[in-house]
């Protein structure tokens, strides 16, 4: 099975879905490379992160559409195209720019099916790059999946690896509801084995990456990578934990989390977002409400601080929940503080 980066896995999913279904279109800023070089030909570089590279030569400018620098126009056009029968994949260059098109997402796309009595579907996918760790400053580094998870009518996807990214994106494109698809910038180059053929990863089905009896660790997006490093360190001391990657925050696989909690009695939630009204807080509330009888210790949340993301590399490293903080949280919930 070939090894692909998350960037290439997403690109492969787009190629395969556009081959399969002529209704699938891609639109966004520079998704085809913009106007390009001195020859006047488009460069087809595939946007700032190269994720849509190669789509323009294969599918043409009618299906790979460079837009003005206007997020409200991008999502508004995608919404109208979806209502008219297409299956658009809209790209926002950075997740932080979602504020510019919040009305289109929050008041339009998310509500069409409900307000039209189920007579209209809006099968739009909104892809966006998110996350800290790249020294891009407070306006280009936020993990805002919690903000979108709070909106009824949206499905929210946060993959942690290339294989899941491909399967989840194919599922998103084929879904008849609007899907917001978060791609962590720091995960784009990370590779794993990815099947060449198209496949689907169902929404609302978490991945149990590791099994252990001492605690349950739920980690989201890039935090899965850091949680694995923390568990590797603790394994040398005989500590074993369940590691759960929700993959989608809406719908959330509550049953897998609660079943694991029933077995371990202890829960650590790792979330790159700030703590207030976060996905970590939501999962902690789930455990306190429906899993209270299983708890042997208070739930521990490992999150970013309630501050903007720093630009300083040293401060940004301190901002992001890393393996050492996760390891300390697991020790805390086990009562093994150093």
Image (tube, rainbow, N blue to C red):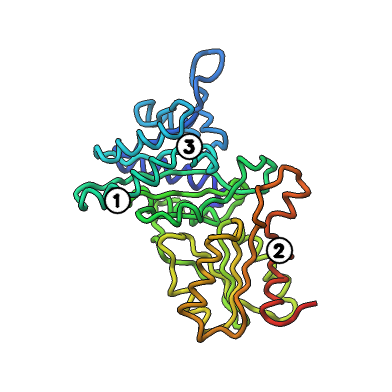
Foreground disc of the pair 3, 1: 3
Read off the residue under disc 2.
323
Q: Quadrant of the C terminus?
A: bottom right
Q: From mark 3 to mark 2, how far is it between C-alphas?
A: 34 Å
Packing grade of label 3 (10 A; few <14, some 14-19, many >=20) is some
- Disc on the earlier residue, 3 or 1: 3
Instruction: For the residues labelled 3 and 1, say whether their Cβ atoms are less than 8 Å apart.
Output: no
Q: Position of residue 2 (x, y in %)?
A: 53, 52
Read off the residue under disc 3.
100
| Element under disc 1 | loop
Q: Decide which of 304, 18 is in the foreground and name it.
A: 304
In this view, 131 is above or below 247: above
Q: Residue at x 45, y 25 (%)?
A: 68
Instruction: For the residues labelled 3 and 2, say whether their Cβ atoms are less than 8 Å apart.
Output: no
Q: Residue at x 65, y 43 (%)?
A: 138
Packing grade of label 1 (10 A; few <14, some 14-19, many >=20) is some
- Disc on the earlier residue, 1 or 2: 1
Foreground disc of the pair 3, 2: 3
In this view, 85 is above or below 226: above
């Amino acid at each position: 099975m070939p090894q692909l980066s998350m960037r290439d896995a997403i690109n492969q999913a787009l190629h395969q879905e556009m081959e399969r279904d002529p209704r699938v279109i891609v639109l966004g800023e520079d998704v085809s490379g913009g106007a390009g070089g001195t020859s006047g030909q488009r460069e087809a570089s595939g946007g700032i992160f190269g994720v849509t590279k190669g789509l323009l030569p294969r599918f043409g400018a009618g299906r790979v559409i460079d837009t003005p620098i206007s997020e409200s126009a991008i999502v508004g056009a995608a919404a109208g195209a979806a209502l008219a029968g297409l299956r658009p994949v809209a790209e926002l260059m950075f997740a932080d720019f979602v504020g510019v098109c919040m009305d289109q997402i929050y008041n339009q796309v998310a509500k069409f099916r409900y307000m039209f009595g189920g007579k209209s579907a809006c099968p739009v996918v909104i892809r966006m790059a998110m996350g800290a760790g790249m020294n891009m400053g407070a306006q280009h580094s936020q993990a805002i999946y919690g903000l979108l998870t709070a909106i009824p009518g949206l499905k929210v996807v946060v993959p942690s690896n290339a294989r899941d990214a491909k399967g989840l994106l194919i599922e998103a494109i084929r879904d008849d509801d609007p899907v917001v698809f978060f791609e962590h910038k720091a995960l784009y180059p990370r590779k794993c084995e990815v099947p060449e053929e198209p496949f689907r990863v169902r929404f609302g089905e978490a991945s149990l990456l590791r099994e252990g009896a001492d605690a349950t660790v739920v980690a989201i997006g890039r935090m899965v990578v850091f949680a694995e490093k923390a568990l590797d360190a603790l394994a040398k001391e005989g500590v074993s934990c369940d590691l759960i990657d929700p993959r989608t925050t809406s719908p959330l696989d509550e049953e897998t989390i609660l079943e694991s909690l029933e077995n371990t009695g202890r829960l650590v939630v790792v979330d790159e977002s700030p703590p207030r009204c976060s996905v970590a807080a939501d999962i902690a509330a789930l455990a306190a409400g429906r899993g209270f009888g299983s708890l042997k210790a208070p739930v521990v949340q490992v999150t970013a601080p309630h501050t903007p993301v720093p630009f300083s590399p040293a401060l940004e490293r301190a901002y992001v929940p890393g393996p050492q903080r996760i390891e300390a949280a697991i020790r805390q919930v086990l009562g093994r503080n150093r």
